[in-house]
Image (spheres, helix red, strand yellow):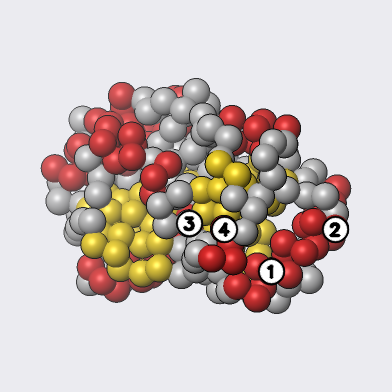
Amino acid sequence: MDKKLVFLDIDGTIYDENKEIPQSTITAIQKLKGNGHIVAIATGRAPYMFNAVLKATGIDTFVSLNGQIVVHNGEVVGKHPLNKEQLNRIVESAHENNHPLVFFGETAVYANVEEDQHISESLGTLKMDYPEYHNTYYQEHPVYQSLIFHADDEDDKYDNKYGGLKFYRWHPLSRDIVPSDRSKAEGIKELSEKLGFSMQDVIAFGDGPNDIEMISEVGLGVAMGNAVPQLKEVCDFETKHVSEEGIYYACKELGLIHE
């Protein structure tokens, strides 16, 4: 098989439900590299949130924050902060609705409230500590992604009201906020062009709503067995659950690796 550029999401794809990496996934990544394929990460997490994954997998190329920061071998390929005017509008609305926010900078993350149960509960599922409080961080530094915390019955307070922004629900109590013209797919395009790959030679694995664009636009999109239904509807191949050696199984079935 010709050399492919293979992107793996982290949560629910590389990580299982316990935020651990199955040994079969490590083996699959090693075999992919051994067969000449390039393996990269495409995640909604910030770079400083997945250092352990980079170390465990030996991967050094990634699309992070849903396409906002793109890196190849330690070199920044692209950075795309949120528009400050649009972010100010969101902050004002969130304040009116009593919805807290978290801001992701290039090297740190901050919350605009000192304590909140929704933030603690949501970020706790990522095994992430409560962010440091910094109410005006977004005014003084580039913000590459924000999180807003509210239940899904309040989505309509924000949906389709901010032309330059879009929302990805990743937890029952929280949604990502990213530019409407950015996504993991856009980050993958940026990196593919840098490395000389056409999108037809790109394979991507994912499980969540923020993976829909990349699974739809790459040459071969793989949905994990634990993926949300709307992702399975647009994928080219549905593999097994992450905890059932889903990555290894797909790589073998697709001829990317061999026993």
Q: Residues within 10 Å of mark 4 (few under 14, many from 20)?
A: some
Residue at mark 3: 105
The amino acid on which the numbered mark 4 sits, given as a three-letter code, is Tyr
Q: Residues within 10 Å of mark 2 (few under 14, many from 20)?
A: few
Q: Residue at x 23, y 68 (%)?
A: 195
Nearer-N-terminus badge (2/1): 1
The amino acid on which the numbered mark 2 sits, given as a three-letter code, is Glu
In the image shown, does 160 or 140 lie closer to the viewer?
A: 140
Residue 214 point in image, percent of width and height: 48, 60
Nearer-N-terminus badge (2/4): 2
Considering only vertical position in the picture, is 126 above or below 179? Answer: above
What is the distance, in whole Å, between disc 2 and disc 1 at their CAs?
A: 12 Å
Nearer-N-terminus badge (3/1): 1
Residue contact at pointers 3 and 4, CB within 8 angstroms: yes
The answer to which image quadrant residue 255 occupies is: top left
Give the numbered dot on residue 88. Answer: 1
Residue at mark 2: 96
Q: Nearer the viewer, mark 2 or mark 4?
A: 4
Residue at mark 4: 137
